[in-house]
Amino acid sequence: MSESVSRSQTMPLFAGEQKPDEDAQRQPGFRLSTFEVFNWGTFDGKVHCFHPRGTTSLLVGENGAGKSTLVDAMLTLLVRPGIRNYNVAAGATKKERDERTYIRGAYDRTAGRDEKPQIQYLREGSGFYTALLATFSSANSGKQFTLCQVMYLTASGDRKIFYGFDTRARSIAEDLGGLKSGGDIKSAMAERGFQVTESYKQYHNWFQRQVKFRPKAMDIFNQTVAVKDVQRLDQFIRDHMLEKKPWNDKVSSLLQHFAELSEAHRALMQVRQQSELLVPVMKWGKRYRKANEQLQEARDQHDSVSLYFDQAIADLLRPLCQQWQLRIDHLDQEITVLDASLKTKRSDAARLEHEIAHSGGARLQRLPDLIAAEERQAESKRDKRLLFEAKLKQAGIAISISSSQQLEKAHARISETREELRRKRTEAVERLGKKEYELGRLRERLDEDNAELESLRRRKGNLPDAFIEVRRALCQAFKLSPSDLPFAAELIAVDPEHSRWEASIEQVLHSYARTLLVPDDLYAKVSGYVDAKRLTDSRGRGARLTYDRVAPTSESTARSTSAVSAELSLPDMLSYRDDHPLAAYLRGEIRHRFDHLACETVSDFQMASRRAMTLHRHVKQNHRQHAKDDRNQENDRRSFVLGWDNRAKREALEQSIRDQQAVVATCQSEIVSLRQASDRATSLLTVLDELSNTTDFDAIDDHRHEFEASQLRLEKAKLEASNDRVKELKSKLAKINAEIEGLDTDRDAYFDERSRTQKQLDDGKSTLDSVDATLASAQSDGSLETVQQYFDGIASQMGDRTLTVENMGRLPTLISHELSLRVGQLEKDVQPIRDNLTKSMGRLLTKFPVFESELDPTPQSLTSFESLNERITQDDLPRHERRFRQRLKEKVLQEIGLLHGSLEDEREEIRSKIEILNEALRRLDWRPGTYMRLEPSDTSDAEIRDFRRDLAGCLEGTLDGTDNANEATFARIEKLVGRLRDDANLRWREKVIDVRNWFKFAAREYDAATGDPGSYYDGGTGQSGGEKGKLAFLVLVAAIAYQYDLRPDDPSGDRFHFVMVDEMFSRSDDTRAKYALNLFARFGLQLAIVAPLDAKAKVTESYVGMYGHIIKDPDTNRSELISLTAQQYRDVQAEENLGG
């Protein structure tokens, strides 16, 4: 829909064409000549015009008639958006009216059906547009220009505005009629001679170039419209000469960031307190662990004393018993030899005595028999000796036996060799047992691999048979297909393109791949079966099963649609069985739980801030947890489970079976060798046992009989050669008797030694049997191996004392007593440490009960406390400190710095504005020869002074950066923010962040000629109300004159001379009102005075050249503007007076 405007719709302001009077023509600068509105607020349907023609005008009407609507139209044309004081006469807020409400023609607010207020509009929907236009003319130069705005609402309710301007006088009816809402209005306006833009800045800059005012001129125009009361200079300057800056957004941002900082500080304080409470726990825990270790070691040493000395006594007595036995055997041999020698000697002596008594040829006759007997004995014993020596050689003992000492030496070697052979046989038997066990394990593994290979040949997947068997039982129980209950591994496979990552992917998904996926509708059956049954594989062995309850599709899909990284990660290297209904769920789980970044280098792996893995199965779960499992070879496919093609795994198993068969053959060969070694040792031990039976040297002493035979042959020769037989026999008898006496002495000495040695041996064997039994029992139950680690400590306790046969009865008791005393002392030492440890643990748990579920105040929980301390000191505390510092430095202090700097900048800006006003005031007389100067000073208000001090204080010491400095800064900020945040301090907050309140404004009179100061006006005391109002109006006009760049003595300049005031004089007395009007007139300012229909308006009549009366039709809610010249207005009044 379009709406056109024709000239016939405009309201004539004059009965006929009238020219402005001569006074108007003489007024300086650009002045409002024409003001027009179309479809603006309640001015609806036609063009409403007002033609002040450069003169001061008065617009009057009842409340609600539309006066402020026209004021707001002028503000829309001249003042930048955002600061316009819309409907300020009614005290409305800036958001109550805006361009949208005026475009739609808002006129009333009524209650709707839901009792909520609803705004009533004259213009609903779209298809219409609004136009505002003002033309300004300069009588002195003959120049003129027009400003206009055309606006409409889009279908979405957004406003669209086009700004037009021209150096000619234009009108809405002739130049803006017939435009189409939503059409190409901009082009249409341009075609009609307007310069058009959608930029307010470009529009305003053109306006400024025409009239050459200062940048803030329209801001003071905006403030002037809002001036109502000029009773107090101080308040007047704050409210009307200075713009209030909106700092609440910065304060809100500060409060928000401080809330985050406060939370970070609370968390940091909590973690610091936890860390501080853990310090004594760690201190006493370290001392307790050391003391307890010493105590436990002492206890273990004390408990091990008995077995230590049993072992020591066994080690001492066993070789001694062997030595004593060998000595006894040797002594027995010596005694036997001596007995045989004595018997022989005594027999020889008897024969000699007999021969002496019967001296003759009998002896010579018997000697050949005696010689033959000795030779037979020699030959028999020689054979035994040679056999004995041969067996010694067989056993590896190279000794020739020619004396009893050599036989004793041989038996010592036999004993040593026997121990060595027993040791070797024991080692061989032990190795044989291990090899046989290893062979059994190999055969078992081989059987399992064969069974696994057969299982794989019957199916396509890679999972071990045990998992398949568990599922088979499940499916059989509920008549399900294996595809109804798939394992995760059966639905995913490594993409061949990424096969080099296969080992690492298998490592990451090792556990999850073996997870059974249970659809939600089967969950109750499966969980009930699993809970009731013992899960077993095909061999009846217990099995382990993990399973996921799969959520409905909507839930799984939500997870699967998580963000995808551009970097290559584990999920990107997988293929899925997309034809299976659970594939979508599995894809989402994999991406959510196993999004491990694929890192080609370890440096990339180390720098990764998320889950990651390398080609070598090195896996990172988070910044703390890492793992690498090399128990299987990297490319050992036998342990791979992913995918639905098992050919590669079958080939790996077949190769493994071949390799294992080769290992089995090698193991069997080693077993044969070990058995042969054991049998060989057993055979040699049998030989040594046979050799041990030969303990009597005389049984193999062939040399003695050879010697006796040689002696008898010599005797025979001598007897045959000599006749002095008796003499020789007696000499020989004496010699034999002497030998018999010596032999008896030796025999008695051997018997005495043997008795002593036998007692030592009996006692030693008894003791050895006892300790061996104890050691054997300890060996069988494993306690001996356990306590052997404490033997070195017991040895240290013994010092330089050595165990001997003499002290072995009392030394163990002495050492046990010493260790018992040490245990008692250590128990006394550890008790106060334990008490301090548990107390410090209790203090932490009392302060932070959250840890009670995982920690107890007992020494047994020390490891858990240490883990907690490590987590807090290495992770939590640095993380919270970084977060606190970051939020303090980068957020809160930045916000405070910005707020403080902005407030201080505004403070300097206010001082600059006051100086600008003072430049204008310097040109105005206060009294003849004097002028006024505004003097701002810092307010003495304690609340503002304290706020400024506290705000600046928050920024002190922030460069230090230490924890103490940060805490002090936080405390200062917390105090300040606490007040800013408290809603009860809303009045205080609004007051202290309004920089205008930081100043106290006063004025001082100065002599224009000398510059000497005179009267002082502080705006509150000491002057009459008239003087205060007069001073306030002086400041206002000075501000306008400065911003408009006006000079009273230079009326020829084409500057902007238009001012609009809305009910400015409604609260002023006539004297102050006339003073203000004269001031405006002195600078040649054209006023558009808006006032209600009351007596106050009469004070302006002598200054007004054009009247406008605004009325509103109560039936249609539309406003009308009726215009009268001053003469017409006076004529109407005269008629009313005559009629009255």
Image (cartoon, rainbow, N blue to C red):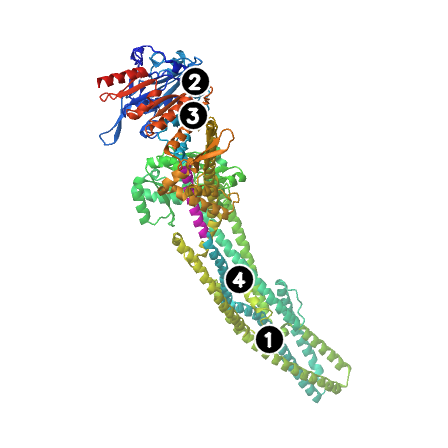
Amino acid bearing label 1: Ile
- Of callouts 4 and 2, the N-terminal one: 2
Front-most of residues 818 and 540: 818
Residue at the disc numbered 1:
328
How far apart are the two marked residues, 1 and 2, measured between alpha carbons?
Answer: 150 Å
**Mark 1 vs mark 4: in front:** 4
The vertical placement of 462 against 365, above or below, is above
The vertical placement of 940 against 667, above or below, is above
Front-most of residues 283 and 1036: 1036
x and y, in percent, of residue 518 in the image: 34, 41
How far apart are the two marked residues, 4 and 3, measured between alpha carbons?
Answer: 102 Å
Amino acid bearing label 2: Gly
Q: Is mark 2 on a helix, strand or loop?
A: loop
Rendered image quadrant of residue 254:
top left
Crowdedness of circle 4 by 10 Å Cα count: few (<14), some, many (20+)? some
Crowdedness of circle 1 by 10 Å Cα count: few (<14), some, many (20+)? many
**Which region shows up in magenta?**
250-274
Residue at the disc numbered 4:
789
